[in-house]
Structures are given as structure tokens and as C-alpha cells.
Image (tube, coloured by chain):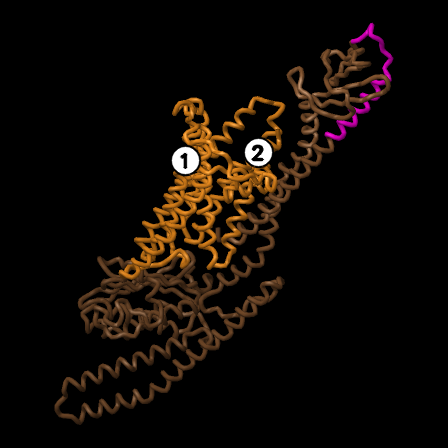
């Protein structure tokens, strides 16, 4: 029971913690305010609570495929917002204070939306799991100790990722952050494909390979890699296609944004890039 | 996020949590395996004990009142079983451990052969697991509960460790603008010694540089006095000799007077700096001194049709007449310059609970609030050189006033005057000995 709780909570926490860690590192890089984090976390927790208590209704949607379809929608939306965010931090170069303010607002809104969606998705599952044990005296202590350990490990990895990114040499920070965002976006899109496959909205196909003998998904490292780079030991073609599409779209947004910024520069607009640490509040 | 303390506490706590929890999980898995082996050996002992039970086919069911069930087989015939055990075989007649599902549960089974019997024992898997987990979980609980305490202790240690840095920051921030004394070197931390040494070196170089600047200004002003005096005499003689007193000559005279004023002000500033000021303070009547200076300067006010009024009784402070004369003269000169033709000036001296208050108010245009502190900076003039009054000035008068006020430990404030417009300069001096000076 304890180990099950650790694995489930770790799986849910780790993903959100890593995403928050990367967004916080970008935010620190841009000297942005952190209000988006508190708004995202609290809004996400409130909506997750209402989703959890109405889960039976939500599950009945789409011919009883509601939970999977809603998860797939939220995961796809996270992917889209990450793509827009990458475009924003690559293309807008605002040193003038008025532009910085508008830029900072857009950045904060996007981060808030991403965190909110991540917390709704992970939070509702955690709430459902924990609420199932509330009345069970025999198991409640083990479940909460397991949940505490899972949460502790997930949050610690998120904090270490955040400080690790900030400790990188300045020239490496932007590529590292963009790479992680690209992997997250790919992971989100791949997971949405899995959800849709489970309810037969996408046809089930045979796995492309099986690497579970080398690295099992339910091992500690497997869990970390699943959250960080979307590791799957038996991926299907639909998952791989979604994964590669997510990563490619993020890189296209980064390249397109950089090109757009250069064009703006040539046209005489005031410019600065993420690496120069534009000040946004 | 930019705090060193937050970084240290968060990063250390995250690392400790990660390693502790991962180790705890490894320990949990290992303990569960050990518990499984322990339960298996217990099952084997039970099987061996059962093998010694003398039984017959007449009494096939034995009530053990235990969570363990068993069967005794001979030649494929069930000759005895515990209450709760099924009549079918619960394990194959092969020696060793295994798992089997029956009676709605998963069971750990053991088959043991002692000629001519096969003894099979079984124990519920979920109960074994739960018992083991209860024991192991209890060992994890202190780790989880202790973590907030550990976080608090890490926070305390980091705060303590950063104390010398905070002390150094406080030393630096408490320094006055003109305090270039070296930092104390008693802060015993090796890491900070280099910073203190470098900062002290910087302070020494800065002080030497400022000293050179002061010396240069003083020497230059001093050397300029004599040629300016000669120039003024020559101009006076020229004016006497020249029949046609052209406007140009008058202009040269005005500029020379301005030049002389600037040089005098620079010298006054130099003389009022703390390291050159050696005056002997004695108790003197500020009211009397102010009245004398007003009388001396009266013509300046009269020339601009300004009315000047004085209010106040005799008030004593410790000081010397040279510096106080310079201070009052500069305040009056400031009021005279920037109050328009026909304006009003009010000088008052009063006694507060703990201070003698000198106040000079005028009905001029006043000073914007955002410039109240800047007017005391050297060479600063409201509106720059193109001051709307058109009055000549070098921006040193109020800087000298401020410096003298600092020498006396007096405070100086700029505010609005009691007239419809204008500003008021308020100085609060420490009074001389109350018993000796105040009327009883």
C-alpha cells in the first residue's frame, strides 16, 4: 500500500514539479514576478477539487470516455501553451518599459495557464486516490506516509532542477530550458495519444519496441525519465508520432521566434533576447 | 529567489529529502523481503511441527485457531486438515514454496514431505504483507515527521552561518556618506577577510582622492583671491580714469564680483569641513547674532524693496560666531536672492522642548519637494544655471549651511513657508546648558 502510494503520488507530483522548476528558472532568468505561480497553483487546486468531486459526472461524458478525453484535451492544451510560450520568449525582445510590462503579463498569463492545467490534471487524480482511503483506518497511515514520501521526492527533484538550471553557464541556460520545454511538450502530446488510445479514439497498434527489460517504467529512474522526457518502454506509433510532433513544434516555434526577432531588429525595433535578461515585472 | 539563505535552505533540504526518502524506500523494499523470508521460515517450522502430529482418518479436522491452514496427505488421501482448509489439495505434492488462490484470497503455500506424509501449509498473503508493512512503516514515520524539524534546523544553521555577511552588510550600510574609516577587521570568517581587505583598500584610495580634491579646491581658491583683489582695484582705477563709463565696464565689474563670491564660497566650504574646523565652541546668543547679521545685510533687502522681520527671544547654543555667521548669512542671502522684488522674509528663533529652532521663511517661488534634499548638494541650483530668478550663484551656499549644521549636530529641513508661496529652512540646534542659560 505504501509503495503504491509512493509510486502514484510521485508520478503525479514529479511531472508538475519538473514543469514548475523549468518555468521558475525561465522566470528567474527574466526577473519576472512569481505571482503566476501562486495563481496557477491555487486556481488549479480549486478546479481539481471540483473535478474530483464531480468525477462520476465527468466520466460519463463522451460515452463514458469523459475522464480520458478531458485529460487528453488538457495535455494537448499544455503542449499548445508551451509552444506559444517558447515563441514568446524567442520572439519578443522588450527592453522599453511599456513593452516589457505587456510582455511580462503575457509571459505570466501563459505560465499561470500551464501550471493551472498541470495541477488540475495531477491534482484530481491525487485527490481521488487519497479520498478513497480517508475512511480506512487500517491503510490511511501507510497511504499518507507513502504520499508524503512521493511528494517529497517529486518536489525535491523539481527544486534541484530549478537551481541546477540556474547554475548552468549563461550560454547554456536558454538551450537547456528550451530542450526541457520541448521534451515536456512532446511528453504531453504523447500522453494525450495514450489517453485517446485507451478509449479507442485512436486505433490500438503493436508497440514499436520493448525496452522494459533494460529500464522498467515503474522503477525510480523510469519514473523520473517518464516525467522528464516522456520515457515509455513500449511506445506505439501514435505515441511516437505525437512525441516527435510536440518536440518539433516547440523547436519550430523557437526558430521562428528567433527569425521574427531578427527581422524586427532589422526593421529598427528595439530588441533584446532572453539571454540578455530582459526585465519583466 | 535571489536570496542566498533561501537557496541554501531549499537546496540542502531538497537534497536531504531526496536521499533520505530514496534510502527509506530502498530500506522498505529490503525489509519487506527480509520479512517475507522470516514468514517463510515460520511456515516451514509450522509444517515440521504438524508432521509430528499423530492423527488418523477418524479425526480428519483439527481446530488450530490460527491464520495458517494445513493438510496432511498420504497416498493421495487427505488424512487430516485444519478447520478452514479446503478438502482439495492447496498445493502440489512437490517440496517448496508457492502461491495459490482459494477461499477468495491469495495464499503463500509450502509442501513438505515426511515419509509417508505430504504436509501442505498455507498462510494468507495479504495478512503477511500487512503485518510486515505495519512494522516497516512505523520505522519510516519518524523520518517523515522529523523532516520539518530538520528543515528548521537547517534554516537556523544557514542563518547563523550568514550572520557575519549580514554584519558586514550592516556595517557598510550604517556608514555615513563622508565616513571613509576602514571597516573593522574583527569579523573572523576567512571568506570575508578578502572582501574587508579589498573594501578597506578602496576606502583608503577614495579618502586620499577626496583629500586631494579638497586640497586642490582650497589651494586654487586661495591663490585666486589675490589676483581677483588686484583685478578689482585695477577695475576701480580704470573706472575712475575712463570718462565714458560704458556698460561693458560695469558688466566686467559684475562678473568679477561673481568670481570673487565663488572663490569665497569655496573657501568657506573648505573651512567648514570637519577635518579643517578647529573652532572652540562657547555659549553664544543666537538671537543677538542673527539680529546683528540682519542689520548688516539690511541694505541688500532694502535694495529689492523686501520686508524682513525678526521674531524671537534670547536663545543660547554652543558654537562659534564665525561658522554661525556664515550659516545665517548664507540663509539670508539665499532668501534675498530668490524672493522677488517687494517680497517678505521672516526670520524666527524659538525654543522647542529639546532644541533651539532657527527658521528662515520667504515668499519666493519655493522649492519642489523632490528637490528638497538636492539643494544641499554642492554646485546644485534649482533649475540649473538658468535659474528663473536670474540671480547669479554657484550652488554652494546651502551646501555650506548643511555642512555647518552637521558640525553642530543640528538638523536642517526644507518645507513650505507660512506665506502664500515660498520655502522655509528650519534648523534645530542643541541648546546650551539649560540651567545656566534659561531664565528661571
| Principal secondary structure, stretch drawn in magenta | helix
Q: Quadrant of residue B253?
A: bottom left
Circle 1: element type? helix
- What residue is at 69 percent from the left and 34 percent from the top? B139
Foreground residue among B213 and B429? B213
- What residue is at 58 percent from the left and 48 percent from the top? B155
Q: Is residue B243 left or right of residue A94?
A: left
Q: Residue furthest top?
A: B58
Q: Residues within 10 Å of mark 1 (few under 14, many from 20)?
A: many
Q: Colour of chain A?
A: orange
Residue placed under numbered mark 2 in the picture: A147
Write down the region rendered in magenta.
Answer: B36-60
Q: Colour of chain B?
A: brown
Q: Residue furthest bottom?
A: B241
Residue placed under numbered mark 1 in the picture: A74
Foreground residue among A212 and B226? A212
Where is residue B437? Give x, y as percent: 43, 64
Counting residues from the start of the chain, the first of labels 2 and 1 encountered is 1
Where is residue A63? Give x, y as percent: 40, 23
Circle 2: element type? helix
Amino acid at each position: 500500500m505504501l509503495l503504491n502510494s509512493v509510486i502514484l503520488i510521485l508520478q503525479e507530483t514529479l511531472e508538475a514539479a519538473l514543469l514548475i522548476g523549468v518555468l521558475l528558472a525561465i522566470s528567474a532568468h527574466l526577473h519576472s514576478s512569481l505571482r503566476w505561480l501562486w495563481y496557477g497553483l491555487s486556481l488549479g487546486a480549486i478546479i481539481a477539487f471540483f473535478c474530483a468531486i464531480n468525477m462520476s459526472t465527468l466520466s460519463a461524458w463522451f460515452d463514458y470516455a469523459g475522464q480520458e478525453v478531458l485529460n487528453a484535451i488538457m495535455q494537448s492544451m499544455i503542449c499548445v501553451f508551451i509552444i506559444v510560450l517558447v515563441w514568446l520568449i524567442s520572439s519578443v525582445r522588450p527592453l522599453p518599459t511599456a513593452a516589457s510590462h505587456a510582455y511580462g503579463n503575457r509571459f505570466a498569463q501563459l505560465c499561470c495557464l500551464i501550471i493551472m492545467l498541470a495541477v488540475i490534471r495531477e491534482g484530481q487524480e491525487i485527490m481521488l486516490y487519497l479520498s478513497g482511503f480517508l475512511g480506512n483506518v487500517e491503510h490511511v497511515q501507510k497511504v499518507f506516509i507513502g504520499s508524503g514520501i512521493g511528494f517529497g521526492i517529486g518536489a525535491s527533484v523539481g527544486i534541484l532542477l530549478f537551481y541546477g538550471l540556474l547554475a548552468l553557464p549563461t550560454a547554456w541556460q536558454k538551450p537547456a530550458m528550451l530542450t526541457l520545454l520541448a521534451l515536456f511538450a512532446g511528453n504531453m502530446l504523447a500522453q494525450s495519444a495514450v489517453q485517446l488510445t485507451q478509449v479507442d479514439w485512436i486505433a490500438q497498434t503493436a508497440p514499436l519496441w520493448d525496452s522494459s527489460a533494460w529500464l522498467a517504467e515503474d522503477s525510480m529512474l523510469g519514473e523520473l525519465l517518464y516525467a522528464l522526457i516522456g520515457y515509455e518502454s513500449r511506445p506505439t506509433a501514435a505515441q511516437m508520432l505525437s512525441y516527435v510532433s510536440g518536440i518539433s513544434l516547440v523547436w519550430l516555434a523557437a526558430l521562428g521566434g528567433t527569425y521574427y526577432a531578427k527581422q524586427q531588429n532589422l526593421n529598427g525595433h528595439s530588441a533584446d533576447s532572453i539571454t540578455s535578461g530582459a526585465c519583466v515585472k | 529567489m535571489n536570496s542566498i539563505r533561501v537557496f541554501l535552505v531549499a537546496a540542502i533540504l531538497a537534497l536531504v529529502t531526496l536521499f533520505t526518502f530514496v534510502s527509506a524506500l530502498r530500506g522498505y523494499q529490503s525489509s519487506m523481503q527480509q520479512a517475507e523470508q522470516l514468514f517463510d521460515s515460520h511456515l516451514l517450522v509450522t509444517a515440521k511441527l504438524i508432521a509430528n502430529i499423530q492423527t488418523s482418518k477418524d479425526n480428519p479436522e483439527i481446530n488450530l485457531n490460527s491464520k495458517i491452514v494445513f493438510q496432511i496427505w498420504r497416498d493421495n488421501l487427505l488424512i487430516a486438515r485444519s478447520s478452514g482448509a479446503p478438502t482439495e489439495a492447496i498445493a502440489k505434492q512437490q517440496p517448496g514454496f508457492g502461491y495459490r488462490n482459494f477461499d477468495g484470497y491469495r495464499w503463500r503455500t509450502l509442501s513438505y514431505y515426511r515419509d509417508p506424509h505430504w504436509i501442505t501449509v498455507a498462510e494468507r498473503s495479504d495478512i503477511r504483507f500487512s503485518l510486515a508493512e505495519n512494522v516497516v512503516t512505523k520505522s519510516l514515520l519518524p523520518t517523515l515527521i522529523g523532516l520539518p524539524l530538520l528543515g528548521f534546523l537547517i534554516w537556523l544553521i544557514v542563518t547563523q552561518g550568514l550572520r557575519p555577511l549580514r554584519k558586514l552588510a550592516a556595517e557598510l550600510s550604517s556608514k555615513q556618506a563622508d565616513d571613509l574609516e576602514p571597516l573593522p577587521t574583527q569579523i573572523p570568517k576567512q571568506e570575508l577577510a578578502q572582501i574587508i581587505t579589498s573594501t578597506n583598500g578602496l576606502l583608503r584610495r577614495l579618502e586620499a582622492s577626496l583629500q586631494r580634491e579638497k586640497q586642490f579646491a582650497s589651494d586654487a581658491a586661495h591663490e585666486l583671491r589675490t589676483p581677483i583683489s588686484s583685478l578689482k582695484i585695477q577695475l576701480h582705477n580704470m573706472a575712475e580714469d575712463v570718462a565714458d563709463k560704458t556698460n561693458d565696464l560695469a558688466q566686467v565689474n559684475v562678473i568679477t564680483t561673481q568670481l570673487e563670491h565663488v572663490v569665497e564660497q569655496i573657501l568657506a566650504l573648505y573651512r567648514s569641513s570637519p577635518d579643517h574646523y578647529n573652532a572652540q565652541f562657547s555659549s553664544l546668543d543666537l538671537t543677538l547674532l542673527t539680529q546683528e547679521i540682519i542689520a548688516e545685510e539690511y541694505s541688500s533687502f532694502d535694495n529689492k524693496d523686501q520686508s524682513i522681520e525678526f521674531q524671537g527671544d534670547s536663545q543660547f547654543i554652543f558654537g562659534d560666531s564665525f561658522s554661525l555667521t556664515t550659516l545665517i548669512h548664507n540663509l539670508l542671502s539665499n532668501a534675498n536672492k530668490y524672493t522677488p522684488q517687494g517680497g517678505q522674509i521672516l526670520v524666527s528663533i524659538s525654543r522647542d522642548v529639546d532644541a533651539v529652532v532657527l527658521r528662515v521663511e520667504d515668499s519666493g517661488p519655493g522649492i519642489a519637494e523632490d528637490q528638497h534634499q538636492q539643494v544641499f548638494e554642492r554646485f546644485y541650483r534649482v533649475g540649473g544655471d538658468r535659474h528663473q530668478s536670474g540671480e547669479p550663484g554657484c550652488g554652494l551656499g546651502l551646501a555650506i549651511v548643511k555642512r555647518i549644521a552637521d558640525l553642530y549636530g543640528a538638523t536642517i529641513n526644507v518645507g513650505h513657508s507660512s506665506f502664500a508661496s515660498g520655502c522655509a529652512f528650519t534648523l534645530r540646534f542643541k541648546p546650551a546648558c539649560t540651567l545656566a542659560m534659561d531664565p528661571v
